[in-house]
Each structure stands twice: as structure tokens, then as C-alpha cells.
């Protein structure tokens, strides 16, 4: 039956298959479906990589430049930074990326000037605006605060289930005022897992900001908070607030 459908209808059906394992199983049934699944569907489900430097602008720019047909197929973004034991070492040869063939190879760079980071942040914001079927977002080099990114995702990715964001490691890297961001929260009812870092510069240790973060995802079941400034944080407030705002919470972890 599936093999008799036009490409457009078959592609629309495959779009609603969320499991990559199921897509692979479908691809193994016949050549016709295999051509439809791979690479246009399977390769674009997950964009992931580990890196030592900063993600170059080209990656976010290429995501923005993708045809709309491919943008809506992206479900997961996992871009996580690892740190060398020796902070003065800049060896970026171990970067590993899983990217669709249509995207240029992304190589992480070392420290950059503020203008580069502003440009990269603007491309990031623009890319998120186009990824309305995203269910997982992991980004460990953010130049935006947790609340700002959650607001942005609440407007563009209503199906988001997992949010894991850490601020860019460095002194004063916060570019909220350099880009256009939504000021009003929307609710992410599917969000069940959240991880974020707290420091003085991200202002996530302020009670009213924390409450807004919690209200965006009222159905969170698992939460991890990483404090980079434990002496300036009211930890007791976290315990009191989460129990009242997140009634579904089953796992809560605080890391210093």
C-alpha cells in the first residue's frame, strides 16, 4: 500500500514516524521506501556533536538556509561542549559531529571576539524560529540566559520535551540585549526534563525569574540545577518552589 503512494504523501507519513529505529525498519522493507527514508528523513532527525571550541556560525546559518521541508524534520539538537583538563590547550581535532550531508562540515573554533559571538547568537535565534518540531534541545555553550532560551523555544517549539542548557564558560558572556527575543512566556506542556545552570550573570538565582522558568514547563518530572555560584544562591528556595509549582516532579538534583 505505501509503495503505491506518491512521494509527497509517503514523505508526509514518514514525517510522523518519530522513532529513528522505526524509520530504519521501514527503510529495510524495500528500495522505494529506503530512498524516501534516507537521507531526507533519517539524517535530519538528530543534529548532534561534541566540541572543544565554539560552534561556528556556519552551522546555525546552514540550519536557517535549509528548505522548509527539512527544517520541520529536525527533532533533536544535541551540541555539547567538553573542556580540556588543561584550559590553555586548544586542541580541537577531536570534534565529533553527526550532521546531514547537505550541511557543511562544522569545525569548532577557539575563543572569539564579541562581534563573532553576537553574530552566532543571532543565527542561533533565527534557526530556533524555524525548528517548530523540536522535541529535544541540548546546548552547552549558550550566550543567552536560561529564561530567554526557554521563552524562545516556547514560541517556536511547542512539542519540546527535553531542555538542557548551560551558559558559555567565561566571564561576562550574556548577549540577551544584542538579539530580538520574545518577552512573554508560553507554556511548554510536553516539557518533562530540564537542566540548567545558575550563576550571578544569568540571574536564575532570582526568585521571580525561577518562577517564570517553572511556569513555562508546568509538567516537568525531572530537574537538574547546576550552581556555579553556590554562595549567592538560596538553595532552600528551590526546594520550596519546585514542590509547589511542579506537582509531577519525581527527580530533583542540585549540583555544586
Image (cartoon, rainbow, N blue to C red):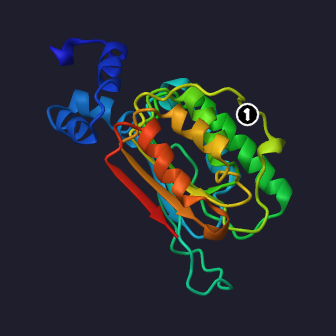
Q: Which residue is mark 1?
A: 181
Q: Report x, y in % for residue 191.
A: 42, 36
Q: Image height check: is 197 above or below 187?
A: below
Disc count in the image? 1
- The spot of residue 141 in percent (x, y) is 62, 58
Query: At 57% from the left edge and 64% from the top edge, which residue is drawn?
Result: 227
Q: Is residue 148 left or right of residue 190?
A: right
Q: Is residue 4 above or below residue 241?
A: above
Residue 220 placement, left or right of 106:
left
Q: Could you say which quadrant of the image residue 205 lies in?
A: bottom right
Query: Along the horizontal axis of the image, is 135 left or right of 168?
Result: left
The residue at 76%/59% (across/down) is 173
Residue at (50% x, 57% y) in the render: 225
Secondary structure of the residue carrying numbered label 1: loop
* Residue 40 vertical placement versus 12 (above, below): below
Question: Where in the figure is residue 65, as x and y percent of width and height?
Answer: 64, 34
Can see residue 143?
Answer: yes
In the image, taking residue 143 as reference, residue 219 lies left or right, namely left
Q: Say whether residue 140 is visible.
A: no
Residue 140 in picture, x, y percent from top left: 56, 58
**To which quarter of the image does residue 208 belong?**
top right
Nearer the observer, 240 or 48: 240
Mark 1 surroundings within 10 Å by alpha-carbon count, few (fewer than 14), some (14 through 19), many (20 or more): some
Screen quadrant of the N terminus: top left
Q: Is residue 184 above or below residue 149?
A: above
Amino acid at each position: 500500500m505505501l509503495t503505491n503512494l506518491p512521494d509527497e504523501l509517503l514523505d508526509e507519513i514518514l514525517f510522523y514516524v518519530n522513532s529513528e529505529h522505526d524509520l530504519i525498519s521501514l527503510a529495510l522493507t524495500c528500495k522505494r521506501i529506503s530512498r524516501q527514508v534516507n537521507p531526507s528523513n533519517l539524517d535530519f532527525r538528530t543534529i548532534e556533536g561534541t566540541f572543544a571550541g565554539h560552534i561556528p556560525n556556519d552551522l546555525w546559518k546552514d540550519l536557517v538556509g535549509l528548505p522548509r521541508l527539512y527544517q520541520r524534520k529536525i527533532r533533536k539538537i544535541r551540541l555539547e561542549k567538553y573542556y580540556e583538563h588543561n584550559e590553555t590547550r586548544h586542541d580541537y581535532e577531536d570534534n565529533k559531529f553527526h550532521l546531514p550531508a547537505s550541511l557543511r562540515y562544522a569545525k569548532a573554533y577557539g575563543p572569539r571576539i564579541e562581534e563573532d559571538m553576537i553574530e552566532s547568537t543571532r543565527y542561533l535565534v533565527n534557526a530556533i524560529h524555524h525548528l517548530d518540531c523540536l522535541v529535544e534541545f541540548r546546548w552547552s555553550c549558550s550566550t543567552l540566559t536560561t529564561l530567554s532560551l526557554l521563552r524562545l523555544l516556547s514560541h517556536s517549539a511547542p512539542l519540546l520535551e527535553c531542555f538542557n542548557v548551560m551558559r558559555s564558560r567565561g566571564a561576562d558572556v550574556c548577549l540577551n540585549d544584542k538579539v530580538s527575543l520574545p518577552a512573554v512566556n508560553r507554556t511548554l506542556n510536553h516539557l518533562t526534563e530540564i537542566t540548567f545552570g545558575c550563576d550571578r550573570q544569568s540571574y536564575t538565582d532570582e526568585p521571580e525569574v525561577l518562577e517564570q522558568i517553572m511556569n513555562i514547563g508546568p509538567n516537568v518530572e525531572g530537574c537538574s540545577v547546576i550552581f556555579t555560584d553556590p554562595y549567592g544562591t538560596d538553595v532552600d528556595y528551590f526546594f520550596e518552589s519546585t514542590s509547589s509549582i511542579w506537582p509531577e516532579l519525581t527527580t530533583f538534583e542540585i549540583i555544586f
